[in-house]
Amino acid sequence: MKVLMINGSPHEAGCTYTALTEVAKPLTDAGIEVEIVHIGKKPIGGCTACGGCKTLRKCVFDDGLIASIAEKMAQADALIVGSPVYYASPNGSLIGLLDRLWMTAGAAALRHKPAAAVVSARRAGTTASLEVLYKYFAFAEMPIVSSQYWNMVHGSRAEDVAVDVEGVQIMRRLGQNMAWMLRSLEAARAAGIEPPKAEPRVSFNYIR
C-alpha cells in the first residue's frame, strides 16, 4: 500500500514538510509506503475553464507537473495534502494545482480512497484552510481521515513545528488513523466487500 503526500508549500523542507514527515512516521512503521511530492516554487496558474481536458483527458496548459501527480494519485491508495496558510487560505499555487487535477481525470481516480489535509500557520487561518481542502475530498467521494483535533501545526520555521508538541501528536495520530483505515479497507476487500459503483453524474441548472 502507498500514501501520496503533496507538499503544497514553496518551501521544500519547511513547516508543512515537517508536519507531513510526522504523519509519515506511523505509516512507515506500519509497512505502508509514503511518497512526498513537492509542488515547487514555480507559480501554478488556476483552471481557465477552457474545456480542453474534456476531450484530451489532461490539462492543455500542463508542463508535466499535473500529469505526473495525476499518475501518482491513480497509483496511490490514499492521499494527504499539506499546505501553509496564506491569508486564511491554502497556498494559491496548490489551489491552482488541485483545481486542474480535479477538472481532469484526477478526481475519478481517487474515488473511495482515504484522504486527509494538514496545514501549517504562524497563528491563525488554519480551520478555514482545512475546510477548503476537505471540499476537494468530498467532491471525489473520498473518506476523510481525522485525528484527535484539527490537523494543524504552528510555527514560522521547521524548528518551531518540532516544539509544537500538540501539533506533532496530532500529526502522529493522523498517521496512525490513516494506517488503520487502509488496513480496514484492505480487510474489507479481502472479505468481498466492494465500494458502491459510481452512478452517471446528473447535472441540474436552477436557471432555465
Image (spheres, rainbow, N blue to C red):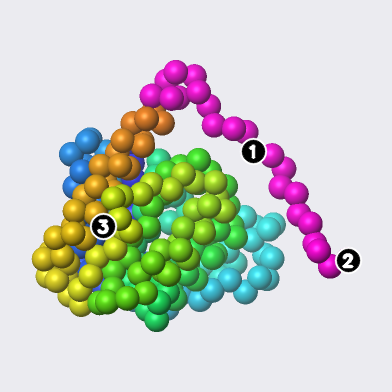
**Which mark is nearer the camera, 2 or 1?**
2
For the question of whether residue 202 can be seen, the reply is: yes
Viewer-side residue, 90 vs 62: 90
Q: State which tag comes first along the sequence, 2 or 1.
A: 1
Residue 165: x and y in percent read 14, 60
Q: Secondary structure at mark 2?
A: loop
- For badge 1, the amino acid type reads Ala
Real-space Cα separation, disc 3 to disc 1, in angstroms: 31 Å
User: Quadrant location of the C terminus?
Assistant: bottom right
**Which mark is nearer the camera, 2 or 3?**
2
Q: Quadrant of residue 157?
A: bottom left
Q: State which tag comes first along the sequence, 3 or 1.
A: 3
Q: State which tag comes first along the sequence, 2 or 3.
A: 3
Residue 27: x and y in percent read 24, 42
Could you tell me which residue is drawn at 36 percent across and 49 percent down?
146
Q: Quadrant of residue 7?
A: bottom left
Viewer-side residue, 149 vs 173: 149
- Residue denoted by label 3: 20
Q: Which residues are magenta?
A: 187-208
The answer to whether residue 47 is left or right of residue 157 is: right
- Residue denoted by label 2: 208
